[in-house]
Image (tube, rainbow, N blue to C red):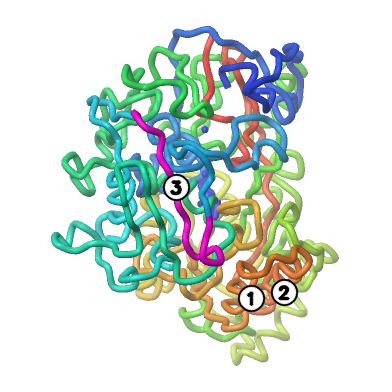
């Protein structure tokens, strides 16, 4: 969520109605729980149906795009639900089981599969309108998917449709380049029916269409890369203004009806998003109740963490959930000498995991030291410690030097570390990694980039990675959906490698891993699926293409004025689609 971790990671997302907050449309209003540390992990804090007021989100960078079809950051997948309705989405309710449940959004029901899970049919709700009053049709959904095929115009977002769809999907260039073409794998037999034809059985397709790439786009209003300046809303809010890289403002969409998507709410009278705000200033404004939410959802910085954890009244208004994310470093397999597996293994052994954990915020607000590529809450995970991350968290320099001998660089080598310079924890972790690798003779140069363009222009562009010798690249990731396939396909299957917005940044091409991912989606046996997941997890680590740092946690602060607050477990942050303010 997998979403990019900007957090971001991936990595990714959207209770006003109290009945919905209790995970059942027919349930009674729950008793408001008292505030307290981690209360929002399992309960709705400050439940309210009151309308009015302004919600203010601050972000220390900017989204990869406000175009719902061109985003992969976890926080933005959480946020775009306020104005974009995909075919399916995740149930708005706290708790891991409830909040990880996929439910209809624009569609009337979940998809109906046929032809051995190779054909999926959806019916969209009749009468749904765009903000200008135009009725949404199935063709608007098809066009929304088609436009994501042009990675030059829309470089972000997952690439599942290009990989999974049949017909001419492998050669289709998208509607911006192919004015007369048509994506033949999608049929629209009438204005409310859309049918997807896949090239392989895919039991998890309801999760794929939960990405906002299926949120409808009217072809007549599409301005390509500039569509993000005013995407046409089908959600509870619409764009009122957008100063690129500075601020955008949403106001209630008068066309919207709650029945169109009961997973989101229209409570606030205005939503303001301030961009490129200093991270420590965001924390100070949160603690003063001057803003509502840190949009990035990554947790507060070091100074605020210390203040919150040492002040009972502040700690009572905070949460430290497991973010369903992992922080790590990609190890690229094409940048010499890291094209040699033993050089990559040297990096794995040399890294000081204790220092990386400290850089990310420590065990409470940063996360647990990670030894595997897969997250512990993914089905099929098993604990192992191939590179002594748990047994020797300070690094195993002797083992690292043995691997350097095997890769032909006994005195070490040089490479570059890419990271997001506007993410303080990522800066600190990259500096910590640089120091620990130097102890083994591996010399690194730090290369910082802005988070908003990190994947679209730099880390996610293989030609740039190669030409700038970015051997190690910081990242964060959460599953695209709550299974091993949703966790790892985009990261590690060779078919996921694309020219821009690439998620397989290691550029791993392991035939066994590709084969196991395909087999995982074809089997109906949970035990066999779990076995494939474990095999993939182990092989990724044997290939040494990912340096795990921590299974992420984040210390989030909720100002007392914020209402309907709870952790949406799929995104690992507060549910942005349902918030209100006192």
Please give the range of residues in magenta: 113-127
Q: Is residue 253 left or right of residue 334?
A: left
**Precedes in sequence: disc 3 or disc 2:** 3
**Disc 1 packing (10 Å; few <14; some 14–19; many ≥20):** some
The residue carrying pointer 2 sits among few (fewer than 14), some (14 to 19) or many (20 or more) residues within 10 Å by Cα, namely: some
* Picture residue at 47% right of the left edge, 80% below the top: 334
Q: Earlier in the sequence, mark 3 or mark 1?
A: 3
Nearer mark to the viewer, of 3 and 2: 3
Q: Which residue is mark 3?
A: 122
The correct choice, above or below, for 435 with respect to 361 in the image is below
Residue 60 vertical position relative to residue 205 in the rendered view, above or below? above
Residue drawn 74% across and 29% down?
A: 42
Circle 2 sits in a helix, a strand or a loop, which is it? helix
Cα separation between marks 3 and 1: 29 Å
Q: Is residue 122 magenta?
A: yes
Q: Which residue occupies the foreground of this view, 523 or 145? A: 523
Q: Is 225 above or below relative to 375? A: above
User: How many badges with numbers are in the image?
Assistant: 3
Residue 504 position within the rendered picture, expressed as x and y whole percent measured from the top left: 49, 68
Q: Quadrant of residue 543?
A: bottom right
Q: Quadrant of residue 25?
A: top right
User: Mark 3–mark 1 contact, CB under 8 Å?
Assistant: no
Q: Which residue is mark 1?
A: 516
What residue is pinned by disc 2?
A: 535
């Amino acid at each position: 969520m997998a979403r990019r971790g900007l957090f971001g990671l991936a990595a990714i997302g959207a209770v006003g109605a109290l009945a919905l907050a209790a995970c059942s449309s027919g349930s009674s209003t729950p008793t408001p729980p008292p505030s307290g540390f981690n209360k929002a992990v399992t309960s709705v804090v400050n439940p309210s149906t009151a309308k009015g007021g302004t919600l203010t989100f601050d972000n220390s960078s900017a989204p990869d795009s406000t175009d719902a079809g061109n985003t992969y950051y976890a926080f933005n997948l959480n946020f775009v639900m306020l104005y974009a309705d995909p075919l399916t989405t995740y149930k708005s309710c706290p708790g891991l089981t409830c909040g990880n449940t996929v439910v209809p959004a624009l569609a009337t029901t979940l998809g109906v599969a046929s032809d051995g899970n190779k054909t999926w049919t959806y019916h969209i709700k009749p009468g749904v309108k765009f903000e200008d009053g135009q009725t949404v049709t199935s063709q608007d959904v098809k066009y929304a998917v088609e436009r994501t095929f042009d990675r030059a115009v829309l470089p972000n977002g997952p690439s599942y449709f290009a990989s999974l769809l049949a017909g001419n999907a492998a050669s289709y260039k998208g509607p911006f380049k192919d004015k007369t073409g048509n994506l033949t794998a999608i049929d629209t037999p009438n204005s409310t029916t859309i049918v997807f034809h896949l090239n392989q059985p895919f039991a998890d397709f309801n999760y794929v269409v939960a990405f906002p790439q299926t949120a409808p786009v009217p072809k007549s209003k599409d301005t390509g890369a500039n569509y993000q300046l005013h995407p046409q809303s089908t959600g509870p809010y619409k764009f009122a203004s957008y100063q690129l890289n500075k601020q955008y403002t949403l106001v209630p969409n008068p066309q919207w009806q709650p029945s169109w998507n009961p997973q989101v709410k229209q409570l606030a009278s205005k939503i303001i998003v301030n961009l490129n705000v200093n991270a420590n200033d965001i924390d100070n404004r949160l603690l003063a109740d001057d803003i509502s939410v840190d949009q990035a959802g990554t947790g507060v910085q070091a100074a605020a963490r210390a203040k919150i954890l040492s002040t009972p009244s502040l700690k009572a208004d905070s949460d430290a959930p497991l973010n369903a994310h992992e922080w790590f470093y990609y190890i690229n397999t094409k940048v010499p000498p890291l094209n040699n597996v033993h050089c990559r293994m040297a990096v794995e052994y040399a890294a000081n995991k204790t220092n990386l954990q400290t850089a990310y915020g420590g065990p409470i607000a940063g996360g647990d030291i990670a030894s595997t590529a897969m997250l512990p809450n993914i089905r099929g995970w098993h604990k192992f410690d191939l590179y002594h991350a748990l047994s020797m968290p300070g690094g195993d320099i002797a083992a690292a030097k043995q691997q350097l001998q095997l890769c032909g660089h006994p005195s070490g080598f040089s490479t570059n570390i890419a990271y997001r310079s506007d993410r303080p924890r990522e800066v600190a972790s990259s500096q910590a990694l640089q120091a620990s690798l130097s102890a083994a003779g591996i010399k690194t140069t730090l290369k910082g980039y802005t988070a908003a363009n990190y994947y679209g222009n730099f880390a996610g562009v293989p030609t740039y990675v190669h030409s700038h010798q970015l051997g190690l690249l910081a990242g964060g990731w959460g599953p695209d959906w709550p299974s091993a396939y949703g966790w790892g396909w985009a990261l590690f299957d060779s078919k996921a490698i694309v020219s821009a917005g690439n998620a397989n940044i290691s550029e791993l091409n392991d035939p066994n891993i590709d084969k196991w991912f395909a087999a995982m989606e074809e089997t109906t046996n949970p035990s066999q699926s779990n076995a494939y997941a474990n095999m993939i997890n182990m092989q990724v680590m044997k290939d040494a293409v990912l340096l795990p740092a921590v299974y992420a946690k984040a210390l989030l602060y909720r100002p007392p004025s914020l209402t309907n607050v709870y952790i949406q477990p799929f995104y690992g942050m507060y549910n942005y689609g349902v918030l209100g303010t006192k």
